[in-house]
Each structure stands twice: as structure tokens, then as C-alpha cells.
């Protein structure tokens, strides 16, 4: 660039004129300001890395979603093979209790049990179940009486539909 004072050509990056000492203050500032964005590509680089990391985040999320779906579907497939669920066994506990309750009634044929959903089943330790419910049945005088009962029953294992796989531990009938 030419010195405006003495017209001598100086290198473009010089701050002073090499001949007369003229300060290239304004022009040098402008040139550095203009040059900076072009010389340092950091903003575009960081944008690229942000875009990259966003892509990675999306990939990771997609991977997690796929894995969760896989695990859930695998659990469903193996769950159907691995036998009855806990709720199947606990509802069977109240059905088995109903057999024992029926046996202890005066007229078992008149027994009417509520829906299994209404009976309280609590799982205890050692595969024991505590069932609380009620039954409507005729007493020895022919009147229909509601009997509350509490039944404690133990599941030995094996076929849950077999009455022999269930041991009655305690039965309490009260009107
Ligand atoms: Zn000069």
C-alpha cells in the first residue's frame, strides 16, 4: 500500500511508513477487522461441530428408542413363554380359596362369589397368599347369608390350576 504522505510503497501489513514514519492507523485497523473473520474460520468450524454433535445426539436418541422397543418386545416374547405372571397366580390363589370356602359351607351349591376383582389378594413370603373376600350362601335355615372370609393359601408350584398344588393354611369364615 502506498503512503498517503510520501507516496512510497510499503508492505501491506506495516503499521508505519518505512520512509516518513506515517502511521497507517485507520487503514491498518480496518484491514485487521476485515481480515479477522476470513483468517480465523473458528465460527464456521464451531457451527460445524455443533451440527455434528446435534446429529450424534439424534443418532444416540434413535439408538436408545430402538433399544427400548427391542427390550420391551423381547420381554413380551419371553414373558409369554416363561409361564404365568404374578397376577395370574394371585387370581388363581383366590379361585383356589373359593374351593375351600365352598367345602366349608352348609349348602355349597348355593354359594355365590363376587368377581375376582373384588377380592383382596396379598402375596406373602414363601409363595403364600392371603385372600380376603365374601360369599353369599344359604345357611342351615335356608336364608341367604353373606359370609366374609380370610384365606391363607400356599402355592407349591407346578400347574396352578391343580388344586393339589395349593395347600390351605388357614381359613376364617364369619357372618
Ligand atoms: Zn511515507
Image (cartoon, grey):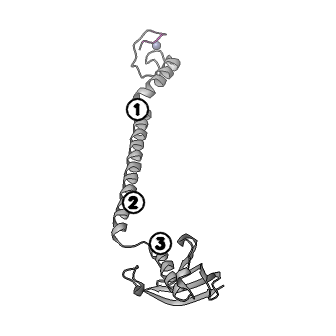
Q: Using the numbered discs, state the Cα–Cα distance from disc 1 to disc 2 in whole angstroms.
A: 47 Å
Magenta segment: 2-6
| Sooner in the amino-acid sequence: mark 1 or mark 2 | 1
Q: Which residue is mark 1?
A: 41
Residue 89 in the image, given as x and y percentages of width and height: 45, 76
Please state which of residues 33 and 90 is positioned toward the viewer in this rendering: 90
Secondary structure beneath disc 3?
helix
Secondary structure beneath disc 1?
loop
Q: Which residue is mark 2?
A: 72
Mark 3 beta carbon near ligand 1 (under 8 Å): no
Q: Using the numbered discs, state the Cα–Cα distance from disc 2 to disc 3 in whole angstroms.
A: 19 Å
For residue 90, side relative to residue 119 (left or right): left
Q: Which residue is mark 3?
A: 87
Mark 1 beta carbon near ligand 1 (under 8 Å): no
Quadrant for the C terminus in the image: bottom right
Q: Using the numbered discs, state the Cα–Cα distance from disc 1 to disc 3 in whole angstroms.
A: 64 Å
Asked whether residue 96 is drawn in magenta, I would say no
Amino acid at each position: 500500500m502506498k503512503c498517503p504522505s510520501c507516496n512510497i510503497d510499503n508492505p501491506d501489513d506495516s503499521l508505519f511508513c518505512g520512509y516518513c514514519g506515517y502511521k497507517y492507523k485507520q487503514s491498518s485497523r480496518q484491514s485487521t477487522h476485515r481480515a479477522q473473520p476470513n483468517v480465523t474460520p473458528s465460527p464456521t468450524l464451531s457451527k460445524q461441530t455443533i451440527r455434528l454433535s446435534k446429529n450424534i445426539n439424534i443418532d444416540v436418541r434413535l439408538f436408545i428408542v430402538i433399544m427400548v422397543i427391542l427390550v420391551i418386545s423381547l420381554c413380551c416374547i419371553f414373558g409369554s413363554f416363561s409361564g404365568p405372571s404374578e397376577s395370574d397366580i394371585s387370581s388363581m390363589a383366590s379361585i383356589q380359596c373359593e374351593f375351600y370356602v365352598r367345602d366349608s359351607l352348609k349348602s355349597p351349591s348355593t354359594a355365590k362369589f363376587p368377581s375376582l376383582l373384588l377380592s383382596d389378594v396379598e402375596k406373602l413370603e414363601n409363595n403364600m397368599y392371603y385372600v380376603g373376600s365374601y360369599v353369599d350362601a344359604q345357611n342351615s335355615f335356608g336364608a341367604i347369608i353373606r359370609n366374609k372370609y380370610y384365606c391363607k393359601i400356599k402355592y407349591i408350584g407346578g400347574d396352578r390350576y391343580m388344586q393339589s398344588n395349593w395347600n390351605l393354611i388357614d381359613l376364617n369364615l364369619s357372618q
